[in-house]
Image (cartoon, coloured by chain):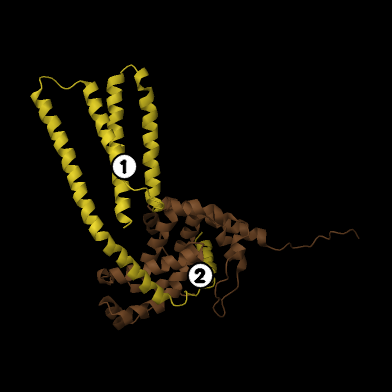
Amino acid sequence: MHAELNEWGGRLSALGAFEAPARGWQAVMAAREAREARLDRRWPVAVAAALLAVTAALGVWLQSAQRALSADAGASAPAAGAVAADMRAENERLELILARLPERQAMRGSTAFTVVVLEDRLALLDDRLSRVALEPNAPERSEQLWRERVGVLHSLVQVRYADVVGSY
Amino acid sequence: MPRISDIDLPDALVSAARAGDTLALEAVYAATAGPVYTLLRRLVRRPAIAEELLQETFVDVLEHIGAFEGRCPLPAWIRTLAVNRALMYLRSPWHRGLEWLDKDPGGADRLPAPRREPGAPLDPGLERALMTLPSLSRAVVWLHDVEGYTHADIGFALGRTPSFSKSQLARAHRRLREVLKQDEPLAEVTPCTPN
């Protein structure tokens, strides 16, 4: 076994070497300048994005704090239907944010893969939501699905947002 | 062909490079670019991608040389950056989407021939066989057999287990043997015309 491994190592190591491209160092310096320029352009956008993200997070936090306060103040927990309505409203808000993000003609492969996975998950949840009324525990199940949809949408917004910010 | 980790750089050059001296960094590039490019050409099939990865690797070197602590030789550190860049590319869905283009049966034959060092044996069969392997298998073979990575190192770099690396290597060796066997000339030539 080891002899075989050594044999492969020996044969492969003996294969020819490739010449590095001519003027390679100049190309490296040019690539470095291009990367720095990209980073310089990103700063103002990143600051604006961070401010927007903080504002959005504050909004979400205020909303959830308000909900918690009203839940405490109320004699009983809100009905499942009301929670599902809240979740639907949150879904709409996130969908709106997604719609406002600029469409990218090209994105990093790994980002595209993540977006596809999240969008597939959304499609699956939408399919389940369209059939949830037929299930015996429809209100609870509906609320659970809407909650999950909000979570997936949150992730999608974050990924798309980071991608848009990263492209500047 | 020297392995990248076997390249010996003078201590003074490494110190100057760590201090950010551009001339020293250019000298490090001159000493290591060839073997790093060869490594990248073995890991990724397309010359243009290998060139881009080479540039990105050395931009990483320029940016992070201050973080190099000298716990391993500088060429080995540069190799790690290059391997990370290449594996990041190989794992990307963008690359996986392009891979079908490389399945052209004549593709490997059309690749430009590498420079052969004087005295190095010519082994076009092995070159071709290597190029028939899927990208990740080829990476495992090259990193293990030539660069001396352990299965644990490869598993870590690929975000997989050492067993994944072992099974990939065994399968890749089997595949190489099969392709090389197909290339062997027939021992006896059977006449195709009746006597």
Q: Chain of mark 1?
A: A
Q: Is residue B53 above or below residue A81?
A: below
- Mark 1 crowdedness (10 Å alpha carbons): few <14, some 14-19, many ≥20: some
Which numbered tag is attached to residue B155?
Answer: none
The residue at which mark 1 appears reads as A98
Report, in whole angstroms, how far the alpha carbon at label 1 lies from the one at label 2: 51 Å
- Image colour assigned to chain B: brown
Dot 2: element = helix
Residue B3 at x, y percent in the picture: 44, 72
The answer to which quarter of the image holds residue A92 is top left
The residue at which mark 2 appears reads as A13
The answer to the question of whether label 1 and label 2 lie on touching residues, with beta carbons closer than 8 A, is no
Residue A127 at x, y percent in the picture: 40, 28
- Mark 2 crowdedness (10 Å alpha carbons): few <14, some 14-19, many ≥20: some
Q: Is residue A142 above or below residue A59?
A: above
User: Relative to A55, is B37 on the left or the right?
Assistant: right
The quadrant of the picture occupied by the C terminus of chain A is: bottom left
Residue B177 at x, y percent in the picture: 59, 58
**Residue closest to the far top:** A136
Closer to the camera in the image, B134 or B111? B111
- Image colour assigned to chain A: yellow
Instruction: Answer yes or no: is residue B145 visible.
Output: no
Residue A116 at x, y percent in the picture: 40, 43
Q: Chain of mark 2?
A: A
